[in-house]
Amino acid sequence: MSDINEAVPILCEDFCQELSAVEGSSFDRVYGGDPPSRVIARTPNLALLADLSPLCVGHLLLVPNRHYLSFAQAVQDHYDEVTDVTYAVLTLYSRTYGHAAVLEHGSAADTEGSACITHAHWHILPVDGALVAARMHADGLHHTDLGSLQDLEPVAELQVPYFYLAHGRYRQVYGTGRVMRPQYLRSVVGRILGIPDPEWDWALVVRREALRLTVQATREWKVDK
């Protein structure tokens, strides 16, 4: 099958469906059992997946098993687990892929500027987070530094969409006071990786081999709560 697609329907319900092992998810339709699963690790409340439409080898998603609009909400309920799992994943990630940036477009109910896929998910990518921050600042976005992951919790109370970036010891929240292009964060990473516009769009280019290589490289990972 070609990596160029007319459309890849990835809906928020798909995460819930796929994580419940219900047949007929977008992953099943796109990959046809090769590989049989993109789930790398599961803990009681979180799942680590290879991105269905990866920008590169090593493009992962960390998602809550339950439906949350944003990780700010998930952190409210599962702070200790998110902290422990993130530390374990990033430790393994650095050994396999080097530096990592964690990105999120957090959503809010009935609010313009929310993400396309409203099941909370963190992107984990082998890119320099400082370059991501520089691109976002150049696009007119401004951030607030967080002292710890726990400082993300109050964002859930605001009920507004946001961008989140973590790299090294930095954690930053960017407001979305103005509506950015759809899949904005993917477009930023795409520019850094040299992917032509709009081939970073998950509906246009799937890069199946990148997912398969990612699943293969992470199959021995052990992630515990």
Image: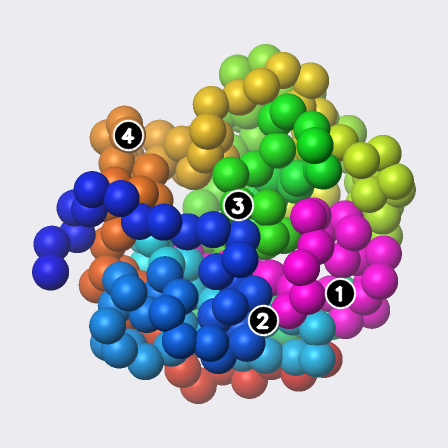
Write the residue at 81% across / 66% down: 78
Earlier in the chain: of badge 2 and badge 3, it is 2
Cα distance, mark 4 to mark 1? 34 Å
Residue marked by disc 4: 198
Residue 117 disc label? 3
Cα distance, mark 2 to mark 4? 28 Å
Earlier in the chain: of badge 1 and badge 3, it is 1
Image vertical order of residue 56 relative to residue 191, above or below: below
Q: Nearer the viewer, residue 120 or 136?
A: 120
Residue 83 disc label? 1
Mark 4–mark 1 CB contact (< 8 Å): no
Earlier in the chain: of badge 2 and badge 1, it is 2
Report the span colored magenta: 59-82
- Pair 1/3: label in front: 3
Q: Position of residue 48 (x, y in %)?
A: 54, 69
Earlier in the chain: of badge 4 and badge 1, it is 1
Q: Residues within 10 Å of mark 3 (few under 14, many from 20)?
A: some
Q: Residues within 10 Å of mark 1 (few under 14, many from 20)?
A: some
In the rendered structure, which amino acid carries the disc numbered 4?
Answer: Pro
Residue 47 disc label? 2
- Residue 88 quadrant: bottom right
